[in-house]
Image: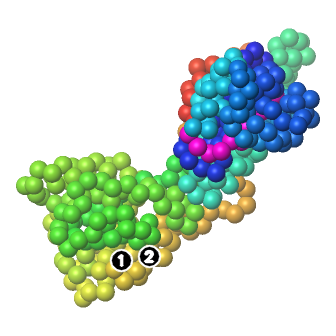
Amino acid sequence: MFSDTIAAVSTALGEGGIAIIRVSGPEAISQVAPLFRSRVPLTEAESHTVHYGHIISPDNGETMEEVLVTLMKGPRSFTTEDVVEISAHGGIISVRRVMDLLLQQEIRLAEPGEFTKRAFLGGRIDLTQAEAVIDLIRSKSDRAFSVALKQVSGSLSERIHTLRHSLIETLAHIEVNIDYPEHDVESLTAEFIKDKSSEVMEGITKLLKTASEGKILREGITTAIVGRPNVGKSSLLNALARDNKAIVTDIPGTTRDVIEEYVTINNIPLKLLDTAGIRETMDIVEKIGVERSKAAVTGADLILLVLNSNEELHEDELALMEQIHGRQCLVIMNKMDLPSKLDKAKLLAHFEESSIVPMSVLEEEGLDKLEDAISTLFFGGKLESGDLTYVSNVRHIALLKKAYKSLQDAYDAAEQFIPIDMIQIDVRLAWEQLGEIVGDTAADSLLDQIFSQFCLGK
């Protein structure tokens, strides 16, 4: 399929135990062979074997690096091409030496995601599986990793292919009736189209039900910790992160900018934003921080409003409550280890009882209740432990919704006995939209955009 051979470093740059350099292409073995000296010549080695030896300079025979070379002959490789993986010492100099020699052998540097792109174009994986590779790398929780791993194995692809197969049957039925109208019973054909459209729409609906949870597992919940100065926002971030990420003092206004930290709570990834205390201030720097805090609140999926239970509600807090009305929000009544002065009845005028969490961050009390409240708010208390086929990709969600709309149009047209050659257009459009999810009908520009998100060497 490809005439050239590519190479890239597949491990992170910098110092490490091992660095892996991946080479793939129709001439990968013959182009690496002159650089590799071992007991068995690389051109005579069996597929899926590992060989100890040295990388040498073809100019003077000088030993450049001590390596292990893994050989995988196509099509039994990830890219479906011949693949050579060189395991060198994990250092910048050793990697540079090997890469320089490879690039002198008419092997070019791979583009981001090109190995996975070749696997896709070679039929080894489809587009949903390729995109799931990115999700595996970027997973921020065990659950997100498990979902991505299930997609890499093809669980979502199977469901999409099943839906497309039903539409192919529908299109074939329509084609026969267009070609042989004398054998067509229009009412029966209309009922067949309605039945098949309903069947596929039901399958799409089941997949879309997982979309909100899948998107959270994939991208995490952007969580803004807000409140007045000195109510314990930074202490809460440190408690959730189990580390001293933010500076905590008794001086109001210590936090002057938005601090980000990723944590995992009950297998749910959270992107925590510790914000500057929201209050009226004449300090120019603090004022900028307050404005950034307000912007963070606007873009957050979840708001943790921290209040000091040892003080009465301040007018700034009442204004903030009005601002976040109707948003996903949990109220933290912090400093419960001190005498309470906060009127809870005023809170209940704005929030449900279930969204109010009493805590003492200093005494590490109530943290488990907060974690449970977050799980309940987004997943009803727990994630399903059975089927891990979640739709988490925004592109997939959009295409599923488009396919559903096309089928709804076909169903409505069949009910009105519109000519079946017109209905065929909507059914075929739904089939193509589902095909774009797995890559069967995807444009080259879309493929370039998707694979450009990968790192080099993947």
Disc 1, disc 2: CB below 8 Å? Answer: yes
Label 2: element kind: helix
Choose between 215 and 17: the one closer to the eye.
17
Q: Which mark is residue 52?
A: none
**Quadrant of res 320:** bottom left
Choose between 10 and 132: the one closer to the eye.
10
Which residue occupies 55% across, 33% down?
453
Three-letter amino acid code at disc 1? Val
Which quarter of the image is occupied by the N terminus?
top right
Three-letter amino acid code at disc 2? Leu
Which residue occupies 71% across, 34% down?
63
Q: Is residue 16 magenta?
A: no
In the rendered image, residue 27, in percent from the top left (x then y), is placed at: 80, 20
Q: Which residues are magenta?
A: 82-92
**Quadrant of res 141:** bottom right
In the rendered image, residue 175, in percent from the top left (x then y), is placed at: 83, 17
- List the residue tagged with mark 2: 367
Q: Is residue 88 magenta?
A: yes
- What is the chief secondary structure element of the magenta stretch? strand
Q: Local crowd at mark 2 within 10 Å, few (<14), some, or many (≥20)?
A: some
Which residue occupies 20% across, 73% down?
250
